[in-house]
Amino acid sequence: MKLVSFDATRTLHIAGAGYIKPDHFFDHTDTITAADVVLFPEYWQINTLLYGLKARVFPSPASYHLGHDKIEMTRAFRLVAPHNLPFTLIEPNTPESAARVWAAMPLPFVAKIPRSSMGDGVFLIDTQKDWQAYLNQTSVIYAQEYLPIDRDLRIVWIGDRIVGGYWRIQSDRSFHNNVAKGGQIESGILPAEACALVERLATALGIDHGGFDIAMVGHHPYVFEFNRLFGNQGLEGKGRVISQAIVDYLSRTACGNDPDNPDDLPPVPHPEAV
């Protein structure tokens, strides 16, 4: 199986994956066309690769398109699992919409800037002053119910299965659970209800590479978002485990290979070599 990578860091442990700098990809169209799978292109490359070169990309187109924008992601989650999404309102940022959302959301609530990550662009709204400060920073209102939690889960889905996960304990500096905002990683059992929700969402939406953020309120799971590109700090084995899962998935699905007798595949690292 021929693999071409546009992200040397994320494919470091995938044997046989040739690397092309994203800015140079127009100079290597023959190599890309000959590849069975193109790994981790940048978002701006996706449409050209899919429609211009008819390439198979990993992560999947759905992982890119839904993972790029919280609004599109939230709408998809609402369709697939409406009872597992916190109460959320999405409106254009107009005075009329702002007043309507403020009246509808119980205090406190969370407001987000749709294209942000690592906890940036996420605000706890408790006063009109908080609300106005948020409105001054966004063109679209994204307001979401504040859940009574002090931790959430990061569950990692690769290909067609969960490969690991961990708890993120709320920062003592803010209400964020994100590691980038001071949240602490803690290993522990992944609740079956949370795992079932991740499997349901990923399978229904065609996501094959994502870190899902799930909150548990009692035994009921809620999904906040998934990240197409995610950190691996809390995973045992870190990048090698993810690479092994990617190779395993591609070996079972790429190019019509028989999963029980794959041909010409890069070697999967042995777990003891991690």
Image (tube, rainbow, N blue to C red):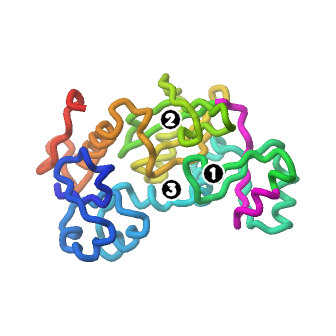
- Nearest to N terminus: mark 3 or mark 1: 3
- Residue 116 lies, in percent from the top left, at 58, 56
Q: Is 188 drawn above or below residue 38 in the view shown?
A: above
- SS at circle 3: helix
Distance, label 2 to label 3, CA atoms, is 20 Å
Distance, label 1 to label 2, CA atoms, is 16 Å
Residue annotated with mark 1? 78
Q: Which mark is residue 67?
A: 3
- Nearest to N terminus: mark 2 or mark 3: 3
Q: Which residues are magenta?
A: 132-150
Give the residue drawn at x 48%, y 62%: 65
**Camera-nearest label, 2 or 3:** 3
Distance, label 3 to label 1, CA atoms, is 15 Å
Give the residue drawn at x 60%, y 37%: 177
Q: Is 55 drawn above or below residue 218 in the view shown?
A: below
Q: Is residue 229 magenta?
A: no
Amino acid tagged 1: Arg
Relative to 98, 54 lies left or right: left
Amino acid tagged 3: Gly
